[in-house]
Amino acid sequence: MEPWRCPIRPGGDRYNDFRHLQEICVSFGDPGAENKHFNTNSVRSFRLVLQVLDSTLREGELFRLYPSDVRVRVASRLADSGLKRVELTVDYPPRTSFREVVPVVKALRDRGVEVVMHGRACEEDIEAIRRYKADGCALYIAVSRLHREYKLHGISEDEVIERLCTAVRVARESGFGYIRATLEDSSRIYLEDGEEGLAKIANSIQRLKESGATIVSLPDTSGLLTPRLTRDFFMRASTSASLPLAAHFHNDYGLATANTIEAALEGAEEVHATLLGIGDRNGIADMYELVATLEDVHGVRTGLNRSSLRELYEYFSRVTGNRNTLASPAFQRGKDGQGGRSPEHDSQKEGGLHPFKKTGERLQ
Ligand SMILES: [Zn+2]
């Protein structure tokens, strides 16, 4: 068999990049929106809305556990910002307790937010998830060779998928409307096994569908992909997948947000992000950057209120001590002589050259 070679190489003819970009932008753009500068008839598909899932109170807890009152406040403000799906983690005593998580679930559900509880693909976690009466559950297990050998004591690929299918069947019998099956570290399978790996992923998705899963997450658990590789991975995976896909990218090389955008443009129907991009190690996609870019550049509607999100960023930054970076579009720069020496570029001034929409203030 031919050794696997990544199809995307500098100077290769796999893509005519610019033409490809045009096709994507139009296919996801709102016909009534302002981004008419992408003018082509090469429409591949059409979608108006993308589901953004906030994972600040799940993935973010891997970074730092916040006091209960802060978690409830953040949950409420996420709802006020227009988030419709928020993920929480099932309690893992003694680090967290059922009693502490319940008010967070309540704050979200009272505001009409769909709550997804995240846990391992095992009976014990599903039992714990059931107690919350959440809307959905997200069950994960690692599928790559590396994780199977070192984390799961060398179990086979088939056994891993069977465990996940069994957990999904239990979740379905429990009556969850949303059941996400996560193939942890699946980007490594794509990188290591290429076409063969993609075929395995497609086969696993079919088995999960037959077991009752409603969506499958293909996370870049170790942050291994670049935007080019992400585009190829999600284009191929979404073509062969029998279920909607979720995108979850880690930021080990600082590319999580860019990769999440690429996955969305290649067909992922749910994208994961956190406030300030917090999460395990270097975090995951940043909520504000993701939403601003998808909406302003690609014309994808997310349903989020940018002004509320900015206020939430300021609150979160203040109460958690996580300082926002100079690079974030969520915070104004160039004011009062701070953060910039080219006032003509300041989007807050009349005639500013930078995208004025990104801060949300002028969106009203
Ligand atoms: Zn993660």
Image (cartoon, rainbow, N blue to C red):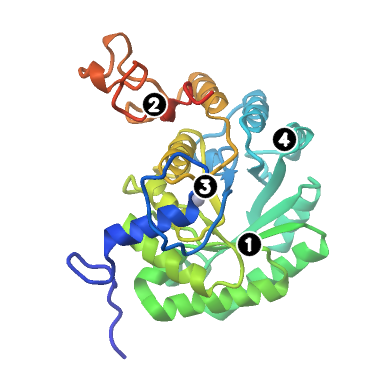
Q: Secondary structure at mark 2?
A: helix
Indicate the position of residue 93 as horizontal and vertical percent values: 68, 43
Q: Earlier in the sequence, mark 2 or mark 3?
A: 3
Q: Earlier in the sequence, mark 4 or mark 3?
A: 3
Kindly report which numbered mark, 2 or 4, lies closer to the viewer in this rendering: 2
Quickly name the residue at label 3: 30
Q: Amino acid at mark 3?
A: Asp
Front residue of this view, candidates 296 and 226:
296
Kindly report which numbered mark, 4 or 3, lies closer to the viewer in this rendering: 3
State the separation of the CA atoms marked 1 and 3: 25 Å
Q: Secondary structure at mark 1?
A: strand
Front residue of this view, candidates 181 and 18:
18
Q: Residue at x 79, y 52 (%)?
A: 130
Q: Is residue 118 left or right of residue 235?
A: right
Q: Amino acid at mark 2?
A: Phe
Are the residues at dot 4 and dot 1 in contact (C-beta closer than 8 Å)? no
Front residue of this view, candidates 42 and 8:
42
Neighbour tally class for label 2: few under 14, some 14-19, many 20 plus, Cα within 10 Å:
some
Q: Earlier in the sequence, mark 2 or mark 4?
A: 4
State the separation of the CA atoms marked 2 and 1: 36 Å
